[in-house]
Image (spheres, grey):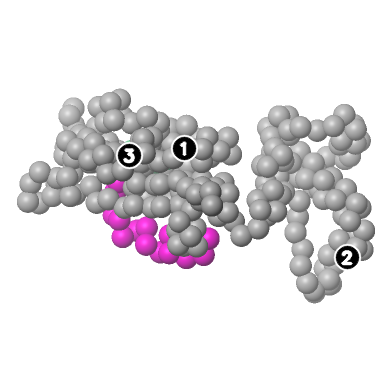
Amino acid sequence: MTPAPHIRFDVLTIFPGMFTGPLDESIMMRARTQGLIDVQLHDLRDWAHDRHRTVDDYPFGGGAGMVMKPEPLFEAVEAIREMVPEPATVILMSPQGRRLDRALVDELAALPRLLLICGRYEGVDQRVVEHAVDLEVSIGDVVVSGGELPAMLLIDAVSRRIPGVLGSEASLLEESFDDGLLEYPQYTRPPVFRDWEAPPILLSGNHPEVAKWRRRQQLLRTRARRPDLLAAADLTPQERRWLDEQPVEGE
Ligand code: SAH
């Protein structure tokens, strides 16, 4: 038997309790029980040096807020690295990092082990960024209160790319961004709900026509909502021509 594909996440945080809900339900829980992903939480305060378990201090140069001290972070990263032989890529969750997108998620899913550092306060001492961190990752151009939610988002997105984590491989194949386009709109029963009809083509049983309709919806949607994606997407010349002929409004 070939061993199950596997990725290990180590999370360094002062709030390990935040992770219990999201990782204990549904797809993440199943992936963990099946051994497809492994998530280890580490409390940064275990590497603090004083009895108050201090991990932050005042910023040099003054200003509001606190900064995470370098000593506990360095010692924790070094200790966690040594816990298993797999080499860890150290990622700092940071609004200043590389934006998490499909391409980055796929790069990360190919690695054996990610060590995620969750910042708090005003962030971490710059020497941590420069000497302990391989990559900074941002979940978007917005600031949240800590790296925990961004780390959970990363774990979820990366885990979905591990073969076997999604129940059906087919649902993995037809998601937004798979072919550089947004997904087509979805409908389920009833066919008519409060006078609003689901597109009859979807109930026709004509699979080639359904596929054509869906592809065209993808093209229209992506043009309307994410022209940046459309520019890079892999369209046939016929599809480009068809799209050029479609009115831009009403999408
Ligand atoms: N003062 C910092 C923000 C600190 S927010 C700055 O302006 O850059 C506190 C922590 O939350 C950060 O250290 C980081 O770990 C996390 N965080 C906040 N926004 C984030 C984002 N968009 N992506 C990833 N992590 C984020």
Question: Which residue: 19% across, 37% down?
Answer: 75
Question: Which residue: 46% across, 37% down?
Answer: 111
Q: Which residues are magenta?
A: 12-27
Q: Is residue 64 magenta?
A: no
- In the image, taking residue 97 as reference, residue 245 lies left or right, namely right
**The disc labelled 2 sits on which kind of residue?**
Leu
Q: Earlier in the sequence, mark 1 or mark 2?
A: 1
State whether label 1 is within 8 Å of ligand 1.
no
Q: Earlier in the sequence, mark 3 or mark 2?
A: 3
Q: Is residue 19 magenta?
A: yes
State whether label 3 is within 8 Å of ligand 1.
no
Residue to which mark 1 is pinned: 111
**Residue 197 vs residue 48, the one in the foreground:** 48
Check whether the beta carbons of the residues at disc 1 and disc 2 lie within 8 A of each other: no
For numbered disc 1, what is the local secondary structure?
A: loop
**The disc labelled 1 sits on which kind of residue?**
Leu
Which image quadrant shows ligand 1?
top left
Q: Is residue 30 visible?
A: yes
Name the image quarter holding residue 83: top left
- In the image, taking residue 17 as reference, residue 54 lies left or right, namely left
Residue found at the far left of this picture: 51
- In the image, taking residue 33 as reference, residue 223 lies left or right, namely right
| Crowd tier of the residue under label 2, counting other residues whose Cα lies within 10 Å: few below 14, some 14–19, many 20 or above | few
- 222 to 196, vertically: above or below: above
Residue to which mark 3 is pinned: 85
Check whether the beta carbons of the residues at disc 3 and disc 1 lie within 8 A of each other: no
